[in-house]
Image (tube, grey):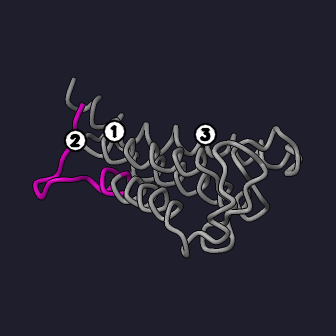
Amino acid sequence: MERRRSEGRTPLQTAALAVGGAFLAIGILGFIPGITTDYDTMSFASENSDAELLGIFKVNVLHNIVHLLFGVAGLAAARAFDTSRLFLLGGGAIYAGLWIYGVIVDFDSGANFVALNTADNWLHFVLALAMIGLGVVLGRGAGVERRTRSA
């Protein structure tokens, strides 16, 4: 079911578009030397990367690709109400899982193949809360609208 306002997008779709756009931008920025410090140490999928986006968030090529994929998924999902909600709730759940993984994993071990650090963990925690919160708050009323239309 696609729910649209007369001006185009619902607030939920706008949120998915904004979140997707932010992920896409972050994924691109992760490949730009200068914005990403120690760029020359970036590896594909290893904890050995010393590259940090904005000098704070540890990244490697795989980490940046994940951001790019989330960005593309968010932009595509923003086309419809239901997919926007799924992107925000599902993406938030994935980031909650990534946060838990980051809390458990030893940053210096080979299991840290996404290249995480403490700053990444806090960001993933906030992203999980924000995405799930947006999906729940802005996704309210969809079930009510369906029941009203079918009655």
Q: Report helix, strand or loop for mark 1.
A: helix
User: Label 1 belongs to which residue?
Assistant: 142
Residue 35, position as x, y percentages in the image: 54, 73
Given the image, on which type of amino acid does mark 3 rest?
A: Ile
Q: Report helix, strand or loop for mark 3.
A: helix
On whether residue 147 falls in the magenta region, the answer is no
Q: Nearer the viewer, mark 1 or mark 3?
A: 3
Left or right of 109, for residue 139:
left
Farthest top residue in view: 150
Residue 55, position as x, y percentages in the image: 67, 74
Left or right of 65, for residue 45:
right
Q: Main secondary structure of the magenta part?
A: loop
Q: Please tell me which residue lies in front, 74 or 52.
A: 52
Given the image, on which type of amino acid does mark 1 rest?
A: Ala
- Where is residue 79, by image quadrant? top left
For the residues labelled 2 and 3, the Cα–Cα distance comes to 25 Å
* Residue at 15% from the left image edge and 54% from the top image edge: 8
Q: How many marks?
A: 3
On whether residue 8 falls in the magenta region, the answer is yes
For the N terminus, the quadrant is: top left
The segment highlighted magenta reads: 1-16
Q: Nearer the viewer, mark 2 or mark 3?
A: 3
For the residues labelled 1 and 3, the Cα–Cα distance comes to 23 Å
Marked residue nearer the N-terminal end (2 or 1): 2
* Residue at 83% from the left image edge and 49% from the top image edge: 103
Q: Which mark is residue 94?
A: 3
User: Label 2 belongs to which residue?
Assistant: 3
* Residue at 67% from the left image edge and 63% from the top image edge: 51
